[in-house]
Amino acid sequence: MRASRAAKSKPPTFQEGRLGYAVGDIHGRADLLENLFTQMEQDSAHSNETPLVVFAGDYIDRGPDSRKVIDLLLSGRPYGFERRFLMGNHERMLLDCYDEPAKARRWLNHGGFNTMRSYGVRPPSMGAAAEVLVEALGLLRDRMSAEHQAFLRRLERYVEAGDYLFVHAGVDPSKPLAQQTDADLFWIRKGFLDCGRQLSHRVVHGHTPVRAAGLEGSRLAIDTGAYATGVLTAARLEGAGVSFLTARDAVFSRA
């Protein structure tokens, strides 16, 4: 990503005349996602152009309802929107397991147990023999519908809109966009989170949880740790303006 002098003279803007949203890491919190859908539908009711919503990836793992989250993402909601879906590192890990079962322990260690449970599969222990892991993955693949598997395999690496770039984890600031690797887009932290340069895009990302969504230089961080905090956030983008919609778990809020 190249440095940008223009970014210093005027703030980044979303697509002219259009309303946009970016939803942070969901991680199996279908309840919060449903709430956020309702908020976005109500908030965009008077928009003259078709709103765009970009989902930042990490739909599965850690939280309790990965299967239902994917059902919701395939449901057509929020209604009347153009919807774009990014690949997160958790979706990439699951697909890697299907292609190379030897990688299953890594995925399970990152919360894959809960995804298995959501599809009605009893997860193996971390110390299980390799053949037990392979059997469990095979059962998960059988239980996961072809529609769900196709959804995971067609997820996008990044989305550009106006002066904005939407990615799951971030970018390597030393490389052009076309040269970003999957490791950069799905996993990066060091070198991106601490980058002090103004970039050619405002980069909207999840992956690294923050206490509250917000701007930091050229970054707009939107992962508020839904599975652990009970807070799922969507950035609202209009012109040069940035604001936020938030779905909160009432149980967490009372804690």
Image: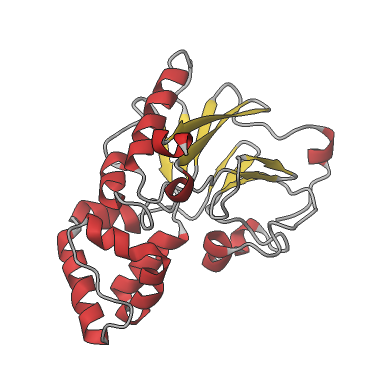
Query: How far across and how far down the image is residue 26, in percent?
Result: 42, 46
Farthest residue in the front direction?
255
Query: How far across and how far down the image is residue 227, in percent?
Result: 42, 49
Q: How is the image coloured?
A: secondary structure
Asked whether 209 or 55 is in front, the reply is 209
**Residue at left offset 55%, top offset 64%:** 187
**Quadrant of the image containing the N terminus:** bottom right
Query: Is 5 positioned to the left or the right of 86 in the image?
Result: right
Question: Compared to 32, does 47 lie above or below?
Answer: above
Residue 56 visible somewhere in the drawing: no
When asked about the image quadrant of residue 185, the answer is bottom right
**Residue at left offset 55%, top offset 68%:** 183
Asked whether 29 or 195 is in front, the reply is 29
Query: Is 111 positioned to the left or the right of 240 in the image?
Result: left
Query: How far across and how far down the image is residue 233, in percent?
Result: 51, 37
Question: Compared to 3, does 53 lie above or below?
Answer: above
Q: How many marks?
A: 0
Query: How far across and how far down the image is residue 8, in percent?
Result: 83, 39
Query: Is 238 positioned to the left or the right of 250 in the image?
Result: right
**Residue at left offset 43%, top offset 16%:** 45
When asked about the image quadrant of residue 111, the answer is bottom left
Residue 115 visible somewhere in the drawing: yes
Farthest residue in the top direction?
46
